[in-house]
Amino acid sequence: MSQAEVRKARYRMGRLERKNTLVAYSFLAPNFIGFAVFTLVPVICAILLSLFEWNGGDISKLKFVGLDNYATIFATKKVAEKGIGYFFNRADLGIALKNTVYYTVVTVPLTIVCALALALLLNKIKGAVFFRTVFFFPYVSSMVAICVCWSFMLMKDGPVNQLIMALGIDFNKSWTADSTMAIWSIILVSVWRNMGYYMVLYLAALQGIPRELMEAATVDGANKWQQFLHVTLPQLKPTTFFVSVMMVISCFKIYDVVAIMTDGGPGRATKMLVTYIYDEAFVKIRYGQASAISMVLLVIVLAVTIIQFGSEKKFSND
Amino acid sequence: MKKLLAVLLAAMMLVMAISAMAEANQILTVVTWDATTTPYLIAQKEAFEASHPGVTIEYVDVASQDYAVKTTTMLEGGDTSDVYMIKEIDNLINWQAQGFAAPLDTTGYDMSGFVGTEKNYAVDGVQYAIPFRSDFWVLFYNKDLFDAAGVAYPTNDMTWDQYAELARKLTDKEKGIYGTHYHTWLSAVVNWAVCGGQYTLADGTYDNLLYFYKLYQDLEDAGACMSYADLKAAGLHYSAAFANGNIAMLPMGYWYVSTLIGYNKDGTCSFNWGITAVPHADGVDAGSSFGNLTGAMINAKSEKKDLAWEYISWLGGPEGAKATASVGARPAWVSEDVAGAMSSVEGFPADETSKGALLPAGVAMEWPVAEKVSDIKTIVNEEHSLIMAREVTPEEGIEEMNERVKELFE
């Protein structure tokens, strides 16, 4: 080949490459543009907005206040005066944070246990398809309808309390109007609604466990429990990892169930981070302060995700 | 050439005709709540369109419970609807601060009939909205239940203690009859403390509410009203509860009159009912009540501000007031004509007590316009829900209200 031919070939290759790259970008573009317009830009705006005081209206009314919004939501003045207990017991952010963490810590493991139990149960029994549909149904139903139904079920004389009374436990309080039970009614509805979805994920994972492993375990004389503990559970690790990451993030963003069932009440018993953001932004029209709270939420979710991904290796199969 | 000219002329005439038609048929968009089910909105639209040929009122309907949030979002988004109705006074104060409300030129506009209520819509002496409805709270009662129990009807000068006694007397657990009914709102249970105008909920101390919380809890304990926890969980609306016919008394806003008249007409309920002034506390004049204003403002982004002014000035004035009163709602414009129109509405109870209840001795504002009032509202409502659900005693709850509102201003 002459030099000219080599150059020509190279040029052709380069053109092909460029073309391929362009094609790849064009495939990515719709997703990226969507992400940029609806997620990236708003996030950047929120970060900036958290440094301003803005009660809506004209943009000219933006007033730079530095970290004042953060000082307000963390009640720094009061905390300095009365100690950190003040933050968690009296400040709105502290209470919302406490409630959200409590809700997440209970809901995530509970949902995983329920979803896994259902998946194991429905893996091989007769009529599994029917039951799978039944358990998946809540996930595709309207959230509002679900919450309204559960509100009725959890009334003072509702079916749930009658069941509890029939078991001999004296309990006749309305769940959603009681400050200790209200958060549990939210947890109950969340677990009940989401377990069907995660069950499907676990079912798929169960199908993927090689049969030889089970057979080998049986030959080695492992009983059902040992098989589950030493074969099934380790094989499900990646799924459990995925499920827990997704759930923790979605739990921190809990809003709809609370808004419909308790509206953050009674008192502040079910005030969550997102309901607090909503109140500040759209009821009290303080966008700056609301943005500051959403930054707190962002940092928490980010931190949790980084920790979880950091420990990903432990969860992988090999 | 001639042909071309003819075509051009014809085209010009067509354009002129179309623009004339467009002018003759102007559409004014008005943002409001529950437009299809609120009788006075329908009556106002009909009356305005009849007296202003060529103008069509088009309502933009927003769900009432989300009204403040949704309308603020609409205005933020640059919505150009011409007129916004105002549900609560502090909404207007916020919107004015945000630059959404167009200032009104009221020179030459007679506002005497508003008896001073219009000042709630003025900021620094500039009027930003016109009131057209002024509701105050009254006591509704089911005459049939009083007759069946052989008890005399309540009167316009009853005290709260007499009211509680009546409620107990009328309660019949076997028949499932409740002596009274409290809706879950703060206003339905303890807002009575502001009647008489000596005290407002933004004053920062809440000891005045104690008497009313105790009164309520005693009645709930006696089974004379449904429990708060159940009402909250079931989301039972007061209108359906009273229309059921097993509730003897209901303290509620005057707006419920037009709903009840409608219910009587369409057969939702058929019992006889009447109204009296709300009971009064010691040291407060009989007939004192509290209430709220409803008004309309012009969107600063509206392109038809003249027509919008024509509409809201009509709406608040005597003509609009007649339309509002014609279906049993209470207009902000007060005059003998209007009072006559209110009591002569078909379906309005004919007795003298009910007519007497139309003239309250004084109407205090449910919530005053004050600094940080939206924060105070949140705090008081949060503690209210705890007291009502019996999570804390009224004394504890009130102490918390005092403490938290104090912290707000530190």
Image: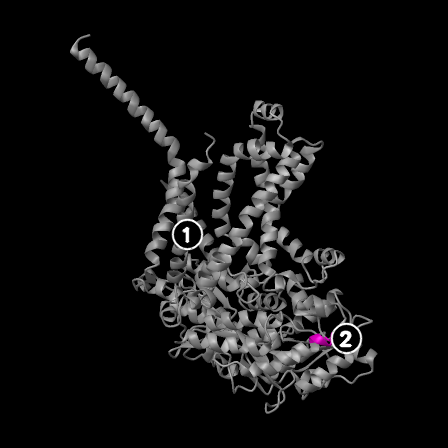
**Residue B99: percent from the left, percent from the top?**
38, 66
Q: What stretch is highlighted in magenta?
A: B220-224
Q: Judge whether A219 appears above or below A234 on screen.
A: above
Q: Looking at the image, which residue is at 59% across and 48% down?
A: A191
Q: Chain letter of disc 2?
A: B
Q: Looking at the image, which residue is at 37% across and 61% down?
A: A288
Residue B326 shows in the view: yes
Q: Which part of the image, by quadrant, shows the N terminus of chain A? A: top left
Outermost residue toward the top? A1
Outermost residue toward the left? A3
Q: At label 1, which amino acid type do we have? A: Ile
- Left or right, B96 with respect to A124, comes to left
Q: What kind of element bears circle 2? A: loop
Q: Is residue B252 magenta?
A: no
**Residue B363: percent from the left, percent from the top?**
56, 83
| Mark 2 nearby-residue class (10 Å; few <14, some 14–19, many ≥20) | some
Residue B327 shows in the view: no
Q: Quadrant of residue B410?
A: bottom left
Q: At label 2, which amino acid type do we have? A: Asn
Q: Name the residue under label 1.
A: A300
**Residue A5: percent from the left, percent from the top?**
20, 11
